[in-house]
């Protein structure tokens, strides 16, 4: 059994008491910060009504964004190797410390319960599911369809029966039915050591649901993880919240971070579930502030794959670059990847 621990005991008492604030009295989960309640059906109707009254930028033709040939080390890299390949949306393959780690593996054509309607891919996965190297660790941030792909889970579980799955509380309920076996569920700030990889679940501001009946019955989170002296942070799916500095303080310094930059308009609706580019850059500044000499590479994720919201699909990377430059950050620390692009990472 994987060793579980919590960093609660190392935190000031006032912070430790707040750790359980995301647990609701009815057994569901919630965002513990002011204004953290996600929108309901009435807000969805308002959004749809407003969309019909405005002219949105058209969805780009399929295959519009730049691609690159992945440079994967097979079956695994060496103990000192450290590389990332952006497959698309929140799916990234990390090869580090002799392990293959994948985040939110989604390879389906539509981010929807069925595959004949719903948001369709604008970009195919930068690395085909069948081309994955052996997967050692899977990190799942939450249960939304653009982050938890039932078909991908089944395929990975069948072809990688020894893979370790690290998920937020109660997400194991879904993937166990689809064939995943070695599952570790973590609460916020709880840690585990899995196959030599040290993983800590970090707070995110979001919500969960796959049906009308399971809203917020499972948790959502990001993950900080490390092996062989390298540290990575996957923010998951999140709006801005006040805990990012503490994440950097408790789990950093980081060598590489993955932060969402897309799916943010209209702001009145999306601001409590998704960050915009300005907030993504602020997140980077927050998580690096406790370690001023640390300048991790930031990969911008969660854009260009599915048309989920109202901003032009090519806006997130352009706007992120502008915000990055305005903040005076080093240009070589921001990575706006092509689909399938691999980057060898050094300190």
Image (cartoon, rainbow, N blue to C red):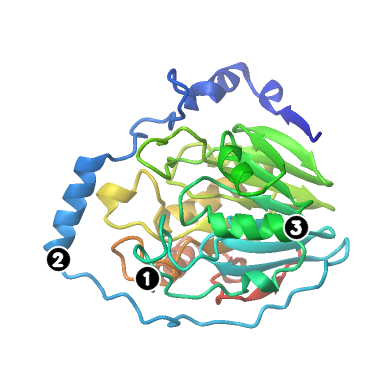
Looking at marks 2 and 3 on the same chain, the residue that comes earlier in the sequence is marked by: 2
Q: Nearer the viewer, residue 329 or 133?
A: 133
**Mark 2, residue position:** 54
Q: Nearer the viewer, residue 283 or 22?
A: 22
Q: How many residues crowd around disc 2 within 10 Å: few (fewer than 14), some, or many (20 or more)?
A: few
User: Which element carries disc 2, helix, strand or loop?
Assistant: loop
Tell me how far mark 1 sits from mark 3, CA to CA: 37 Å
Q: How many residues crowd around disc 1 within 10 Å: few (fewer than 14), some, or many (20 or more)?
A: some
Residue at (45% x, 60% y) in the render: 261
**Mark 3, residue position:** 160
Q: Is residue 82 left or right of residue 108?
A: right
Q: Are marks 2 and 3 in contact (CB under 8 Å)?
A: no
User: Which element carries disc 1, helix, strand or loop?
Assistant: helix
Residue 23 position in % (x across, y down): 49, 24
Can residue 295 be spotted in the picture?
no
Q: Marks 2 and 1: which is nearer the front?
A: 2
User: Which element carries disc 3, helix, strand or loop?
Assistant: loop
Give the residue at the far left of this rendering.
53
Relative to residue 347, is residue 30 depicted above or below? above
**Mark 1, residue position:** 315
Looking at marks 2 and 1 on the same chain, the residue that comes earlier in the sequence is marked by: 2
């Amino acid at each position: 059994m994987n060793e579980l621990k919590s960093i609660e005991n190392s935190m000031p008492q006032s912070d430790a008491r707040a750790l359980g604030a995301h647990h609701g009295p009815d057994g569901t989960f919630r965002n513990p910060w002011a204004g953290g309640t996600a929108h309901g059906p009435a807000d969805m109707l308002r959004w749809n009504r407003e969309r019909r009254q405005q002219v949105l930028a058209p969805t780009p033709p399929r295959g519009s964004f730049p691609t690159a040939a992945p440079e994967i080390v097979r079956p695994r890299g060496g103990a000192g190797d450290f590389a990332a390949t952006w497959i698309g949306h929140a799916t990234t393959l990390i090869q580090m410390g002799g392990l293959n780690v994948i985040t939110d593996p989604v390879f389906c054509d539509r981010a929807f319960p069925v595959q004949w309607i719903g948001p369709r891919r604008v970009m195919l996965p930068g690395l085909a599911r069948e081309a994955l190297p052996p997967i050692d660790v899977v990190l799942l941030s939450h249960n939304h369809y653009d982050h938890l792909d039932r078909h991908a889970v089944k395929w990975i579980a069948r072809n990688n029966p020894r893979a370790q799955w690290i998920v937020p509380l109660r997400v194991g309920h879904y993937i166990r039915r689809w064939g995943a076996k070695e599952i570790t569920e973590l609460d916020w700030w709880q840690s585990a050591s899995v196959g030599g990889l040290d993983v800590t679940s970090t707070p995110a501001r979001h919500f969960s649901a796959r049906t009308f009946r399971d809203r917020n019955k499972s948790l959502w989170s990001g993950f900080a993880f490390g092996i062989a002296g390298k540290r990575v942070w996957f923010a998951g799916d999140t709006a801005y919240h006040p805990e990012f500095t503490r994440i950097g303080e408790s789990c950093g310094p980081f060598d590489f971070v993955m932060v969402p930059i897309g799916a943010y308009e209209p702001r009145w609706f999306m601001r409590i579930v998704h960050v915009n580019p300005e907030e993504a850059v602020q997140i980077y500044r927050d998580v690096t502030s406790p370690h001023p000499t640390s300048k991790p590479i930031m990969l911008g994720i969660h854009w260009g794959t599915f048309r989920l919201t109202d901003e032009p699909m090519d806006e997130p990377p352009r706007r992120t670059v502008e915000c990055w430059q305005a903040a005076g950050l080093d240009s070589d620390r921001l990575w706006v990847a092509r689909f399938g692009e691999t980057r060898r990472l050094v300190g």
